[in-house]
Amino acid sequence: MSPRTLLWNSTERRPRAPLRLLATPLVVVLVAIIVGIGIGSTVSDLLGTSRFGQLVISLVSVSTTGLAGFLVARYIDRRTVSDLGFGIDRDWLLDLGFGLALGGVLMTLIFLVGLATDWIAVTQFRLGPDRVLGVVALFVFFIAVGISEELLLRGVVLTNVAEGLRWRFDVPTALTVALVVSSAIFGIAHLQNPNSSLASTLSITLAGVMLGLGYVLTGDLAIPTGIHISWNFVQGGVYGFAVSGLDFGTSLVETTERGPDVVTGGPFGPEAGLLGIGAMVVGALCIAWYVQFRYGTLGLDSSVSVPELRWRRNS
């Protein structure tokens, strides 16, 4: 096999999966540098170091992740937008609504169980105009986080791993390995967050499995995107928990943890504790039930491992 054949898939007219995966972090870094130089410094000069200014800077930073994922998918993977899991139609929006509802319900269950057991206590309610405005801004931020991370981790990474493995393994094996690999990367990516640990990394990996499950069962990113947005927002913007180690300092309810860190997650937030892990397991079961109920079947969607290439659609 020639070097060109090892690197280039002439049938699909694009680089092979390992090369596409290697290109992904390079594009993410390149886009982050360009945006940071061109926009980030300007935003910083205009808004300064205020909490709102830092939130806007974070929003710009997070959005670069989604932009990089889109560029990789379109120009390196050569896939269509719908093949990214964002083929938005009525069914997609209904699945998104389910994901949004489920993420909020799961985090509310964590809150209620914590209250009932005295592992979590409410210290204050805040409903003033400034606080509400801050919470709304946080919601916008988490929309960007949910879309960007799902596009990159599931839409690009999981899909490319599955596409690369399908030539050697059957579809269920390829999708299962891709789900595990992308979830592990999701967990490792959060190691840079404050108060991270081995326990938090493993729990975030499990969260990646829950989110990825919605993708590999439906072939769309609607369910995981919805869960990702509402889980983070309700966690940090409603109940005041740390979100993967990050304390945003603005929420409708202020809480404090009284229980052991192994249960509450401590300063990293519920995701690193047994409460969060329990919610993830419940979430995975709810996703499976919903897919079975709505689509009448429950199985891995082979379309995730079969690319819909732009040049084929245009030819």
Image: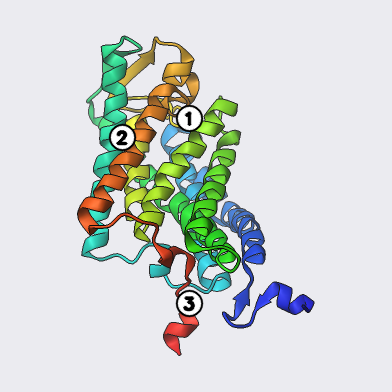
The amino acid pointed to by label 1 is Leu
User: Which residue is label 3 attached to?
Assistant: 309
Secondary element at tag 1? loop
Disc 2 residue crowd, few under 14, some 14–19, many 20+, Cα 10 Å: many
Q: Could you tell me which residue is drawn at 37 percent across and 37 percent down?
A: 232
Q: Residue lying furthest bottom in this view?
A: 315
Residue that numbered label 2 is attached to: 135
Return the x and y of residue 233 as percentages of the image width and height: 34, 37
Real-space Cα distance between discs 3 and 1?
38 Å
Give the colouring mode of the picture.
rainbow
Look at the numbered disc 3 and give the secondary structure of its residue. Answer: loop
- The reply to whether the C-beta atoms of the residues labelled 3 and 2 are less than 8 Å apart is no
Image vertical order of residue 216 relative to residue 7, above or below: above
- Mark 1 vs mark 2: which is more N-terminal? 2
Label 3 or label 2, whichever lies nearer to me, is: 3
> Which numbered marker is on residue 246?
1
Measured from the top left, where is residue 174 in percent x and y? Answer: 53, 59
Q: Residue at x 62, y 60 (%)?
A: 21
Q: Nearer the viewer, residue 157 or 306?
A: 306
Query: Mark 2 and mark 1 in contact (Cβ < 8 Å)?
Result: no
Judged from the image, the secondary structure of the residue bearing numbered disc 2 is helix
- Residue 91 can be seen, yes or no: yes
Q: Residues within 10 Å of mark 1 (few under 14, many from 20)?
A: some
Is 150 situated left or right of 34 in this image? left
Image coordinates for residue 58, horizontal then vertical, percent? 48, 42
Q: Quadrant of the N terminus?
A: bottom right
Examine the image and state in which quarter residue 123 appears: top left
